[in-house]
Amino acid sequence: MADKSRPLTCKIGPSILNADLSNLEKACIQWVTDMADAGADQYTFHIEATDNPLALARKIREAGMKAGIGLKPGTPVEEVLPVVEAVDMVLVMTVEPGFGGQAFMADMMAKVEFLRRSFPHLDIEVDGGVGPATIDACAKAGANMIVSGSAVVKANDPRAVISQLRNSVVKEL
């Protein structure tokens, strides 16, 4: 549930999808270390729940973890309305999930704008094709949690990219 007593904050989370996953344990440890050094705020691991997402969200919260629900590009934003009060965050996918390096779908910003208008205290995350060229659209639409894979991980200076993403979002909060 959105915490209405606290102001929204910006969180930047590089996507592990772009890490070298040939040795998952080593990749995760190295990736988290590298991204923490670059200024990342969060590390998100997604699970897919197609059956009864409301029950799963409640169980996750009961376990003391944050629960969120995601929207693929073809899923109408109205699909999350029955569960939005039971989650901490709504993720709007701005690419088709599955692989990194895809082009950002700017038309997904309408979903972000709807959610921000409807739920002003809700954490809204965007994931897919988000980087320096697309961050302003995300921030202006109302996203405050940013997942950026290729733009951060493949940058010569990941810290500078994370800083640029953060500055854009903070300016809009």
Image (cartoon, grey):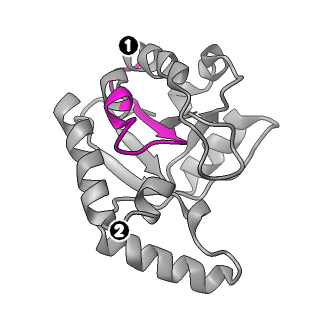
Q: Amino acid at mark 2?
A: Asn
- What's the magenta region? 119-138
Is 31 situated above or below 171?
below
Which of the 4 image quarters holds residue 69? top right
Residue reaching furthest left?
A: 171
Residue 88 appears in the rendering? no
Image mark for residue 17 = none
Left or right, residue 145 beside residue 38: right
Where in the figure is residue 65, as x and y percent of width and height?
51, 55
Residue highlighted by disc 2: 156
Choose between 126 and 69: the one closer to the eye.
Answer: 126
Q: Is residue 148 magenta?
A: no
Task: Compare residues 55 and 15 and report the one nearer the observer.
Answer: 15
Is residue 137 within the magenta segment? yes
Residue, x 30% and y 67% (percent of image)?
Answer: 157
Residue 123 placement, left or right of 136? right
Circle 1 residue: 117
Residue 52: quadrant of the picture: top right
**Vertical position of residue 80 compared to residue 43: above or below:** above
Query: Badge 2 local density, few (<14 within 10 Å), some, or many (20+)?
Result: few
Which mark is nearer the camera, 2 or 1?
A: 2
User: Label 1 sits on what residue type?
Assistant: Arg
Q: Give the x, y percent position of residue 25.
A: 63, 83
In the displayed structure image, the side of residue 36 where residue 87 appears, left or right: right
Please tell me which residue lies in front, 153 or 109.
153
Q: How many marks?
A: 2
**Which x, y percent locates residue 58?**
62, 42
Image quadrant occupied by the C terminus:
top left
Between the residue at mark 2 and the residue at mark 1, the CA separation in whole angstroms equals 36 Å
Give yes or no for contact between labels 2 and 1 (Cβ–Cβ under 8 Å).
Answer: no
Q: Residues within 10 Å of mark 1 (few under 14, many from 20)?
A: few
- Left or right: 68 with respect to 151? right
